[in-house]
């Protein structure tokens, strides 16, 4: 019997955890042809989430829990959750229930047809309109600048074969978003449209600043074009400055006694070039930071406690795919 791993990373979701557990359990009871496990990975929540997870794990042995020592971020904890899965196919679900779990049978149907990657694609959203439009703009920018074709309007919600996640684990790309890793691997992706729901309870910890940080990191991960743009813009600015110098020199020669340029143009040019240099240094700094993240050897997360895990082979194990 094939096994489905339902992976749910969470942080401060005390009101949503029981709901997502009931929703997933109810959905899987409709699919008796599959075994299943529900893996919650808690990112050091400051509310009662860890206690609720322990109670669920005590009541249901199919619930597995990983408690982290600190908040390692949704990308790293989400991947670690999946890397510890033992199923044949992995389905990532947001703890806030914005992903409709009713799509799980559809995902599994396409997976059974031979698609190793089946992803939900948001064609509508009930979230804040401004946030949704900004995300659409983000996807267009990434799509336009990326060196590899990217898929718009997908998150981690979908069914991915365990073998694909094993390859992702081997890449050691802990910070890079799963959507960009899938584009990098080049698998055929079956897209299933859906409408994103509002959060059931609580407030997302993913604020505007973290969204901006994620957007910049995604651009740096998927494209070298910003570096090439710095070279081109730098060349244009150099030519522009040279032309201004030549024009000022000609005017001074032709109107030696009458032409008085003053210091204002000089200040404006210096400020302009200084701003361009700082902007370019910022871009270089982002790439250097990205290099540092990739070459620094560190654990994806540090786990404080594991509950209901046994000695089954998981995604990380080579023997599972030998």
Image (cartoon, grey):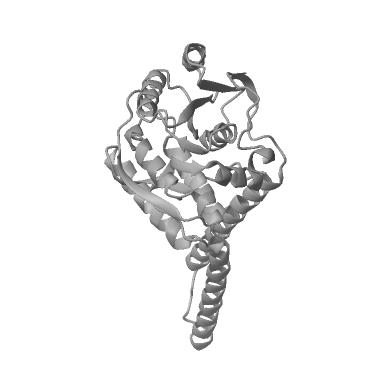
**At 63% from the left edge and 31% from the top edge, which residue is drawn?**
301
Compared with 83, 69 (above or below) is above
User: Hey, which residue is sitting farthest bottom in the picture?
Assistant: 254
The one nearer the camera, 85 or 76, is 85
Q: Nearer the viewer, residue 298 or 1?
A: 1
**Vertical placement of 250 versus 11: above or below?**
below
Q: Nearer the viewer, residue 245 or 62?
A: 62
Tell whether 47 sits left or right of 70.
left
Residue 167 placement, left or right of 98? right
Looking at the picture, how far across and down is residue 50, in whole percent? 51, 16
279 relative to 8, above or below: below
Residue 9 in sight from this viewpoint: no
Q: Nearer the viewer, residue 43 or 114?
A: 114
Q: Position of residue 249 (x, y in %)?
A: 54, 82
Where on the picture, by quarter, is residue 94? top left
- For the point 64% across and 38% down, the residue is 320
How many labels were placed on the picture?
0
Q: Is residue 165 visible?
A: yes
In the rendered image, the quadrant that contains the C terminus is top right
Q: Where residue 217 sits: x, y (%)?
A: 53, 48
Give the image location of residue 289, x and y in percent.
63, 47
């Amino acid at each position: 019997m094939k096994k489905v791993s339902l992976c749910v990373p969470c942080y401060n979701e005390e009101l949503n955890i029981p709901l997502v557990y009931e929703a997933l359990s109810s959905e899987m009871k409709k699919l008796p042809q599959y075994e299943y496990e529900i893996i919650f990975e808690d990112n050091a929540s400051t509310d009662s989430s860890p206690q609720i997870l322990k109670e669920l794990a005590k009541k249901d042995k199919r619930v597995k829990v990983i408690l982290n020592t600190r908040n390692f971020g949704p990308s790293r904890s989400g991947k670690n959750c999946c890397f510890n899965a033992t199923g044949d196919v992995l389905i990532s679900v947001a703890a806030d229930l914005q992903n409709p779990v009713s799509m799980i049978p559809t995902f599994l149907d396409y997976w059974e047809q031979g698609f190793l990657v089946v992803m939900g694609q948001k064609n509508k959203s009930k979230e804040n309109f401004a946030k949704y439009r900004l995300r659409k703009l983000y996807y267009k920018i990434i799509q336009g600048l990326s060196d590899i074709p990217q898929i718009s309007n997908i998150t981690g919600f979908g069914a991915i074969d365990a073998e694909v996640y094993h390859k992702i684990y081997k890449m050691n790309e802990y910070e890079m978003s799963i959507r960009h890793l899938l584009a990098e691997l080049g698998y055929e992706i079956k897209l299933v449209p859906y409408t994103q729901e509002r959060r059931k309870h609580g407030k997302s910890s993913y604020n505007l600043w973290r969204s901006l940080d994620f957007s910049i990191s995604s651009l740096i991960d998927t494209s070298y074009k910003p570096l090439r743009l710095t070279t081109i813009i730098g060349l244009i600015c150099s030519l522009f400055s040279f032309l201004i110098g030549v024009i000022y020199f000609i005017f001074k020669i032709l109107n030696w006694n009458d032409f008085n340029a003053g210091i204002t143009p000089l200040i404006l040019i210096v400020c302009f070039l200084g701003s361009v240099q700082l902007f370019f240094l910022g871009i270089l700094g982002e790439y250097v930071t990205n290099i540092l993240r990739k070459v620094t050897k560190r654990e994806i997360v540090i786990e404080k406690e594991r509950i209901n895990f046994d000695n089954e082979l998981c995604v990380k194990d080579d023997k599972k795919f030998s």
